[in-house]
Amino acid sequence: MVTASISPLRDAMGQITNFVQVCREITREVEMERRLHQSQKMEAVGTLAGGIAHDFNNIFYTMIGYTELALNEVAPATDLEKNLNEVLKSAWRARDLVRQILSFSRHRAESFQPVQICRIAEKALAQISAGLPESITINRKLLSDTPVRADPDQIHQVLMNLFTNAIHAMEQAGGTLAVSVADADVDAETAREHPDLHQGEYVRLTVADSGTGIPADIRDRIFEPFFTTKAMDQGSGLGLAIVHGIVKTHGGVLFLESRKSLGTRVDILLPVA
């Protein structure tokens, strides 16, 4: 992207003799401004979501507590006991949803420690392998044992969310889920191009699929909480918002590349411990 200005040159009589054109490359400035606006929007939404989530948490724990007390007074194997158990299950699901919102908004305490991303990736891949359709294959390259300072539960949550989205994108036609963990060095030039990066050593986690891809017109919205293209019963729209929040909390950076019908690739850089 280029901005240009054109100015006339005049002679002693005031007549225009020439024009001077000055062009300036502004692609990087426009991209930086877009990222800043996106970051500010996500920060504002996260603050709002965090405040609301804490209030809802108090309400749900009250519901859970009084429902459990009521169950103690109810005769077993009755319709009333069954109905109260359904209320209790719904309250627990709502509490879990609040925990996801708090993860996105970074209002939840983390337990940071040196962890190896490849070990967490192995466990997460083992979990999803059992229920994976035959039409989807896994290509894994877990090459780095370098530790990062992270909350292992939250890194596991990041992986499961990315795996779930990738599998969903390949449900119809099948494809390949590619997962890699490798060391990466960020040089000074790359750090200047990406304000959230610093020069130094990182571990790169990559999750890629050969699925349906993300249309260009919604690509900037996919990390917003509750934004989803799935059916109402297939997701809350918090998965990628949580991934984004966790990566930011860990001082990392997330890059996404996607083209409709050509798949999606997510790269996460986390600083070495």
Image: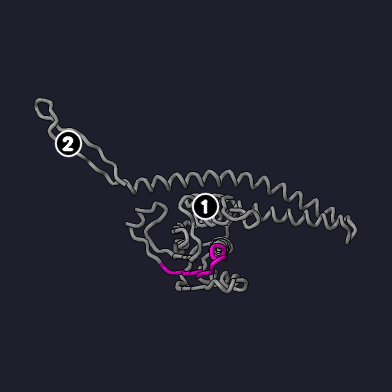
Residue 270, visible in the rendered structure:
no
Q: Amino acid at mark 2?
A: Phe
Residue designated by label 1: 223
Furthest residue toward top: 13
Q: Nearer the viewer, mark 1 or mark 2?
A: 2
> Do labels 1 and 2 touch, CB within 8 Å?
no
Tell me, yes or no, whether the highlighted magenta stretch contains residue 172: yes
Q: Is residue 131 above or below residue 45?
A: below
Circle 2 — which element?
strand
Q: Is residue 160 left or right of residue 196?
A: right
Residue 195, visible in the rendered structure:
yes
What x and y, as percent, mark residue 167? Answer: 56, 65
Label 2 CA crowd tier, 10 Å (few <14, some 14–19, many 20+) = few
Q: How is the rendered protein coloured?
A: one colour
The residue at 56%/71% (across/down) is 125
Tell me, yes or no, whether the highlighted magenta stretch contains residue 156: no
Circle 1 — which element?
loop
Total numbered labels? 2
Out of 2 and 43, give the one closest to the viewer: 2
The numbered dot on residue 19 is: 2
User: Reading the chain from its start, which is encountered first: label 1 or label 2?
Assistant: 2
Q: Is residue 143 left or right of residue 84?
A: left
Q: Amino acid at mark 1?
A: Phe
What x and y, as percent, mark residue 6? Answer: 22, 36
What x and y, as percent, mark residue 224? Answer: 54, 49
Magenta-tinted stretch: 166-183
